[in-house]
Image (cartoon, rainbow, N blue to C red):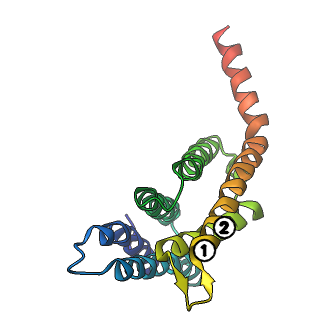
Amino acid sequence: MPFNFPILLTWLRVALIPLVVGVFYLPDTMLSPFEKNLAATVIFIVAAVTDWLDGFLARRWEQTSAFGAFLDPVADKLMVAGALLVLVQWNRVNAVIAFIIIGREITISALREWMAQIGASKSVAVSSLGKIKTVAQMVAIPMLLFYGDLFGVIDTILWGQILLLVAAVLTVWSMFYYLQKAWPLIKEKAEQLMDHKS
């Protein structure tokens, strides 16, 4: 298993995930509800920054690796899933929206793995639609973790819910986009399997 600074940042992101969740379960004598919200928001933002930084440094320093390419999206999905689950627990996110986002991530990850195995990973490469979805999601989640007025001006509850709804719509849209791109190969493999059985 290779180890370098970009991979260390990815492991740091994995380590931060339980902190985003765990901070909400600290007793109020240690942190007030506002301090818990603020701490979870800061931790999530730090984790999100490492997501950008590890990829940037890996490319800049030519330290990309197969293991890093595997670990990075796993860390991203764990981070988003962990934050969404705690937001559902505290009634800040509808469980259906969380299910749509997490379910899509699992589905597309499985599709990408299968496409990579048959040498067609470029067919499900990240699209601009997926990138917009990710941006909306990564802005919405810290807003909902903060859950209050930011600087007395921005209603993070309202804007977080709007952006997460946008992310959910784009999640479904991008999932169908990827499935459509992969469908000819899925159909071809299914036909080959049927021919082989017959």
Determine crowd level at label 2: few under 14, some 14-19, many 20+ residues with C-alpha closer than 10 A: many
* Picture quadrant of residue 143: bottom right
Whole-percent x and y of residue 146?
48, 77
Tell me the tag on residue 139.
1
Depth check: give the residue in front, 4 or 156: 156
Q: Position of residue 101 (x, y in %)?
A: 58, 53
Identify the amino acid type marked 1.
Val
Image quarter where the N terminus lies is bottom left
Give coordinates of residue 21: x percent, y percent.
35, 66
Under tag 2, what secondary structure?
helix
Residue shown at the point (77%, 48%) measured from the top left? 177
Most extreme residue toward the top is: 198
**Neighbours of disc 1 within 10 Å: few (<14), some (14-19), many (20+):** some
Can you tell which quarter of the image residue 28 is in? Answer: bottom left
Residue type highlighted by circle 2: Leu
At x 78% / y 42%, what residue is drawn? 180
Q: Residue at x 66, y 45 (%)?
A: 119
Residue 38 in sight here: yes
* Quarter occupied by residue 10: bottom left
As helix, strand or loop, the secondary structure at mark 1 comes to: helix
For this rendering, which residue is in front, 190 or 169? 169
Q: Which mark is residue 154?
A: none
- Give residue 102's position: percent from left, percent from top: 53, 51
User: Could you give the CA–CA distance between mark 2 and mark 1, rounded to whole angstroms?
Assistant: 7 Å
Circles 2, 1 touching at the beta carbon (< 8 Å): yes
Viewer-side label of 2, 1: 2
Which is nearer the N-term, disc 2 or disc 1? 1
Name the residue beneath numbered marker 2: 163
- Compared to 59, does 21 lie above or below? above
